[in-house]
Amino acid sequence: MSGPPSGLVATLLDRLDDPAWLVEAGTGSLVEANSAAWRLCPQATHGTNICDLLEPRLDAERWAQLCDQLHDEHHTIAAHLRGGDQVVGVRLTLSLHALDGRTVVLVAGTIARSEVVTEPDRVETDWTVVADTLDEGVALLDPTGRITSVNAAFCRFVGRSEHQLLDRTVHDPPWDLVLEDGGTPDPRTSAPVGALRTARTCDGPLLTPRHVKGERPWFRMAAHPLPGDEPGATLGAVVVLSDETPGRRAAAEVDRLLGADALTGLASRARIVQVVGSLMQDIVGAASAVRVGVLHVDIDDFRAINESFGPHVGDAILLQVADRLRDLGERRVEVGRIGVDEFLVVHQADGASLAFDARLRRLAEEVQRRLSEPFRVDGLTVRLTASVGVARSPGDAATADDLLVAANRALDASRSAATHPVEFHRADHGTGAGRGLAVDQELRAAIAQRDLDVHYQPLFDLRTGGIAAAEALLRWHHPLRGPVPPSVFIPAAESSGSIVAIGDLVLTTVAADLRSWIDRSILAPEVRVAVNVSATEFEHPQYVERLSRVLAEAGIPPQRVELEITESLLVQDLRSAARRLAELDELGFLIALDDFGTGYSSLSYLHSLPLHALKIDRQFVSDLRDGRSGTITRTIVSMAHHLGILAVAEGVETEAQRDVLAQAGCDIVQGFLYAPPLPMAAFERLAHDQARSRDRAGQLRVAADAR
Ligand code: C2E
Ligand code: MG
Ligand code: MG
């Protein structure tokens, strides 16, 4: 490696107390190492093959296999390192990175047991000593699948003694483990059997012992073949159980926090979408006519109450509203709160559509009646009215989201009528499509007239203080109306389909700007540009092809581009979205999950997606002082780290927020505290000034070193 990045990388590596090596993914040859690593293996030099440092030596094929797996996740292996004439037991965590347009592997080591230093010929016999110090469960298999050795963690995970495990075979395993859905895994397709049969590393699903009471431990079983001396021969396999409990616990905690409204304990929007979605599934499968209805309830003029009596009276009233809605009894399946003064009531029944509509109307009028009864708080008596919009399925919508949108449109109609009657959704309701159409026509003209402009907002690395990335954000300056916010025109463009043309415009602009920054060395090589991708764009059959072509034409490596997607893109068809993401990941693009925490609280899919970062939604950052948002933020950060990806916070406006985020371990921040989205020229100046001050600091360091 040559030039400044090498220095930077060496400096970063040296911050690690434990040994770390940076090696070329393709060849395994050593690019850089830190002081601890040079001390541990003094015989190594730049260019030494990492496989030669391992004992026994790793062959090129196994190295290639390891690198292949790194595309999905990082990987930890137990190994021995030859340091001079000694051999040391270590755990090596391997992860894939891009550096200067090259793919490199960071090999980070921890010494398995300090000072466990053995002579080379004792490596075989001493493995159990080392294995017992590992957090992972490890078992050795002979080529027939017989268990010949296990460590303490393995016994603990599967809840069996060493005696119960040894000499048993993985074809008829001596443990009783269940899958997440309660099913029993088939031994014929288990990871150990797969590794023995194919001589390749195999991963299995999450597992837990069947008879555990209380909180269950969850682990994943992977198996790695042990290559024999002869090519193609195996000595058996190593089975590794890694504990996934902390990650699952964090995910469950976020699910719980996101599933309920903190003030009233009612369901959140995400939970309602889940409930409605599963009820609608029943519709599809049912023989009789099952129907689902949603009431969207809005307290009229609630703001006036908060303003006249103060928020504590407002909160007390909302609690009573929640109680009155809960008391609807069997007539409601679920009640949620989705805005300050907006509630959803879900109802399900079977029968004819007219009868169902009549029931929904009675329920809605009952809601209005209950909420019109006086509320008493602190000696005050307050009277309210409520608008109600109703939508039902089948009829008004085919998905849970659309059903909620339809109820919302009906609510708009109720709000705008003088007496706020119960309104049922109708096709001619102000769907927003009419409004959207006008916006969309103007938008198409704006694309043609180039009234759209891309601004860039820098993202900063909290540890180094340097620019980590820039997010491209679209701006529309309307000749008459002035600036139109993306929150208005992006949804309109999405529903009309012109988002595809807009996406192209953003992409070609970003490609040209990035090319010019690279040519003029304005951005350091590790800085990437983030582009927002909407679901409609992403699902377009030619999306990957167009994206790759535009960047290739500008000569931009995919590693410099981060695609920001949202969870909405994953709910329709997770499998096909995951496939497309894997394709993008393979091409080298980085993928971030934007606005995280606001979407659909199922987090179980996260570990299976090739994500590079989680962006915590700015709603949580903006009220970090609130205990719940603080907890969600910290939990998301720890979950991101557990997944081995970056935690990014957007909307950072104050130093207090930055301090809380830094304390929570957040990696990257973005917000007005640092810089707003800037026109290209202004962003260039900022990046340039940053680079200059970095160079100056570097020169000072070099001068100090020379002295
Ligand atoms: P986003 O991707 O979550 O973008 C971040 C938003 O937060 C931007 O709003 C940004 O201006 C704003 N922001 C940044 N720092 C702060 C802060 O400290 N405080 C506050 N209150 N806000 C901050 P913007 O530019 O209005 O964009 C809104 C949304 O529109 C974006 O949310 C994104 O989802 C969408 N969008 C913007 N440009 C594009 C685009 O080119 N394509 C697509 N598909 N969507 C876009
Ligand atoms: Mg974004
Ligand atoms: Mg965002």
Image (cartoon, rainbow, N blue to C red):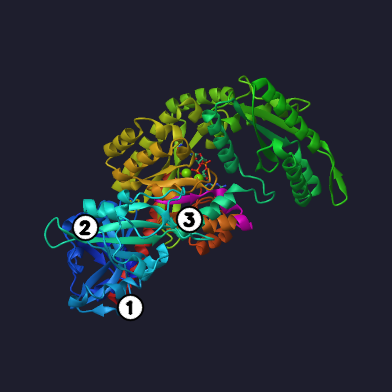
The label on residue 114 is 1
The label on residue 63 is 2
The residue under label 1 is which amino acid type? Ser
Q: Secondary structure at mark 2?
A: helix
The residue depicted at 28 percent of the width and 65 percent of the height is 167
**How many numbered discs sit on the rendered protein?**
3
Q: Nearer the viewer, mark 3 or mark 2?
A: 3
Q: Which quadrant would residue 427 be assigned to in this image?
A: top right
Residue 214 placed where, x, y %?
54, 61
Is residue 624 rendered magenta in the image? yes
Residue 284 placed where, x, y %?
52, 29
Question: CA gap, disc 2 to disc 1?
Answer: 26 Å
The residue depicted at 43 percent of the width and 39 percent of the height is 574
> 10 Å neighbourhood of mark 3: few (<14), some, or many (≥20)?
some
Residue 474 placed where, x, y %?
47, 38
Which quadrant of the figure contains the C terminus? bottom left
Is residue 329 rendered magenta in the image? no
Q: Is residue 497 above or below residue 220?
A: above
Question: CA gap, disc 3 to disc 2?
Answer: 30 Å
538 left or right, relative to 58? right
Could you tell which of marks 3 and 2 lies nearer the N-terminus?
A: 2
Residue 29 placed where, x, y %?
19, 61
489 left or right, relative to 689? right
The residue under label 3 is which amino acid type? Arg
Could you tell which of marks 2 and 1 lies nearer the N-terminus?
A: 2
Cβ at disc 3 under 8 Å from ligand 3: no
Mark 3 sits on what residue?
248
Could you tell which of marks 1 and 3 lies nearer the N-terminus?
A: 1
